[in-house]
Image (cartoon, helix red, strand yellow):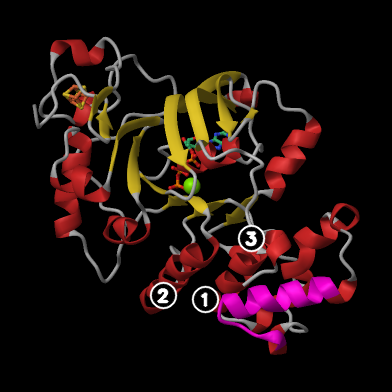
Amino acid sequence: MLPIDFLPDDRYGHCMMISLQQVSKEFKIRRGLLARETQTVRALSTVDLDIGAGEVMGLVGESGSGKSTLARIVMGLYQCDSGHFSFGNLDSRTMRRADWQRLRGDLGVVFQDPASSMNPWMSVEEIVAEPLIIRKKALGLTKSARRNRAVEMLEATGLSSAHLGKKIHEFSGGQRQRIAIARALILKPSFLILDEPISALDVSIQAQILNLLVDLRKQYGFAALFITHDLSIVSWFSDRVAVMYLGRIVETGTADEIFEKSRHPYTAALAHSKLDMDYSKREFYTLPGEIPSPVNQPPGCPFAPRCDRVLPECTKRFPEKTVVGAQSFHCFNPLVA
Ligand SMILES: Nc1ncnc2c1ncn2[C@@H]1O[C@H](COP(=O)(O)OP(=O)(O)OP(=O)(O)O)[C@@H](O)[C@H]1O
Ligand code: SF4
Ligand SMILES: [Mg+2]
């Protein structure tokens, strides 16, 4: 366990940890001869999402549905075009530089390919302790205290002090991901962003890393946004799941609710595909029908071109949110009344 001074405090209150309100994000891309033509990619459209303190929210959706863009907004790497988000009592509309720094210190991030964010010349000790080094003045830790913390985190993730002096190329994919998790947790963040943390690993290693995350969550009590393509494992680690489709969150609820009692036709199709999924490949099943382009999207429900329950109003406007107990969805013609 980390020393007592690293235990969670009251910085953000005990209410909703993260709340996105009507967040939209577009990218302008240049195409055509001499890049004269400008097209708009709508990556996120009026996204609402709440994640409670200590809660793990799974985020699933096909490639290009906007999962990483949402994560990057929360990390402060992208600004919303409209809408806003809050992190405890910090509000993105009024946050100053110091607030962003504070937020980043309380956010741990793990990506699919850990090596891409690690300097190959740095030792494991330097990599894991890097967040402490960046905040050296504020934390006032000596080099040996930083080393002790790095060792604690390596041990918590199944590695040891024997790995401190090694370089990243000396490790397997699973061990690299353990190092990435150790680094992400060293500041004892109250929130983790896990963007496809196990997708690049062998199936046998995936289960080990997932079990490690489950154990670490019990130990450290962090909340998390868990982005995954793999529907079969999302319920393993998530308390609730949000389903994204072309920049929209179309349904949220517990994994059991949304996959066994889907109200949105897209979630129902995913739940059905989950049964047919090729577990040897564990790839996200691609539904039949053409996925509309995120470029210059027409109005209405983005699932309309693939939906067998489509009504005339579906192509006119996006449905409002309907809340039933802990489940919410956006659909004019849901499956369960
Ligand atoms: N920096 C960027 N510039 C232009 N378009 C972008 C940029 N980042 C993302 N996009 C586009 O925004 C949309 C959402 O992308 P995003 O990476 O968020 O999807 P994703 O759900 O994370 O996909 P994947 O599962 O493949 O990681 C896609 O159409 C993508 O091409
Ligand atoms: S709103 Fe209409 S098109 Fe969209 S999922 Fe529901 S029924 Fe299908
Ligand atoms: Mg992504």
Q: Mark 2 and mark 1: span between their CA atoms?
A: 8 Å
Secondary structure category for the residue under label 2: loop
Q: Which mark is residue 174?
A: 1
> Picture coordinates of residue 306 (x, y %)?
19, 31
Res 288 seen here: no
Amino acid type for the residue under numbered disc 3: Ala
Amino acid type for the residue under numbered disc 1: Gly
Q: Which residue is mark 3?
A: 184
Span colored in magenta: 145-161
* Disc 1 residue crowd, few under 14, some 14–19, many 20+, Cα 10 Å: some
Q: Which residue is mark 2?
A: 202
From the viewer's perspective, is 104 left or right of 327? Answer: right
From the viewer's perspective, is 82 left or right of 130? Answer: left
Q: Quadrant of residue 252?
A: top left
* Disc 3 residue crowd, few under 14, some 14–19, many 20+, Cα 10 Å: many
Q: Quadrant of residue 293?
A: top left
- Which mark is nearer the camera, 3 or 2? 3
Does the closest atom of ligand 3 sit within 8 Å of the Cβ of label 3?
Answer: no
Q: Could you tell me which quadrant the C terminus lies in?
A: top left
From the viewer's perspective, is 67 left or right of 167? Answer: left
